[in-house]
Amino acid sequence: MLLAHDGVGEGAAVVLIHGITECRQVWQPLIAPLAERYRVVAVDLRGHGESEAGDAYDPITLAGDVAETLAHLDAQSPLVVGHSLGGVVATAFAAIAHPRAVINVDQPLRLAAFKDGLSQLEPMLRGDAATFQAAMDMVFQPLAGPLPAAEATRVDALRRADRAVVLAIWQTIFDSTPNELDEAVAMLTSAVTVPYLSLHGIDPGPEYSTWLSDHIPTATVEVWPEHGHYPHFVQQERFLSRLTEFDRQSLR
């Protein structure tokens, strides 16, 4: 699927992939600064923003849409930056395509652990519209962390929770056992060989760095403590500097 997208700037490509229920406009504060150095492409995942809905929403399908869109734009060997769900999609992109590097913002890949919390909300997510929205609020409200009030309001205004899309994206989490999720993650990550920065504002735990390195030997885990789910917006200048530094290191 060709995704709705925006592109600006010249130079090496950087593609920005948003999280679940969000859209490409969420990256707006970072796009102009990035475009001073890079060719920046921001996409709407299928079922989000201005992109069409689809029949499948697994990570490989979502990453395939990104790959098709970048091929259409002739944006080769991109640095792929994904936040939240976008971090999973960026990882899948690295497994099926040819990025020069990946930055995964605050998305742990231990999906079996994610299942533990999400399964408790499944009955609410499958309830009526009001119950579904209450469940989504329970998911997102604790994540803002130290986001400035104006920035939190901006992000919230861009969020649109389409129940059919949300349930389709999380269907594998609901339907799979923890062991099956572990196996799926192992298969996906085994194909990732490019430099990979896993940047977290919410600490994924003391064992995560070792776990991720076992799955992606090229990975680096970096934690910005107490920055919440949006560290790239809490400290925008720091994130831009870190992105540029990581990209430069990945080219050595």
Image (tube, rainbow, N blue to C red):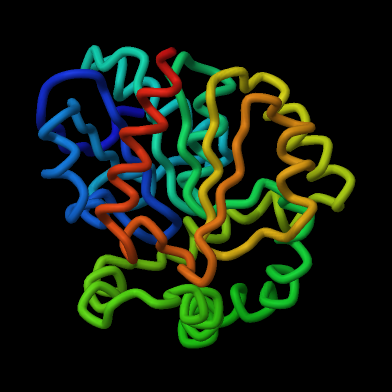
In the rendered image, the vertical position of residue 245 relative to residue 107, given as above or below: above
Residue found 26% across the figure and 82% down from its top:
149
Image coordinates of residue 182 in percent, x first then y, are 82, 42
In the rendered image, the vertical position of residue 151 relative to residue 90, given as above or below: below
From the viewer's perspective, tell me whether residue 49 is left or right of residue 185: left
In the rendered image, the vertical position of residue 106 relative to residue 73, given as above or below: below
Task: State the quadrant of the C terminus.
Answer: top left
Task: State the quadrant of the N terminus.
Answer: top left
Picture quadrant of residue 7: top left
In the rendered image, the vertical position of residue 158 relative to residue 78, given as above or below: below
Closer to the camera, 235 or 105? 235
Closer to the camera, 37 or 23? 37
Residue found 24% across the figure and 12% down from its top:
74
Residue found 61% across the figure and 18% down from its top:
193
Image coordinates of residue 118 in percent, x first then y, are 68, 68
Image coordinates of residue 96 in percent, x first then y, are 55, 18
Residue found 80% across the figure and 50% down from its top:
176
Image coordinates of residue 159 in percent, x first then y, are 32, 67
Exactly how many numbered labels are in the figure? 0
Closer to the camera, 188 or 173? 188
From the viewer's perspective, tell me whether residue 211 is left or right of residue 66: right
Closer to the camera, 39 or 249? 249
From the viewer's perspective, tell me whether residue 230 is left or right of residue 55: left
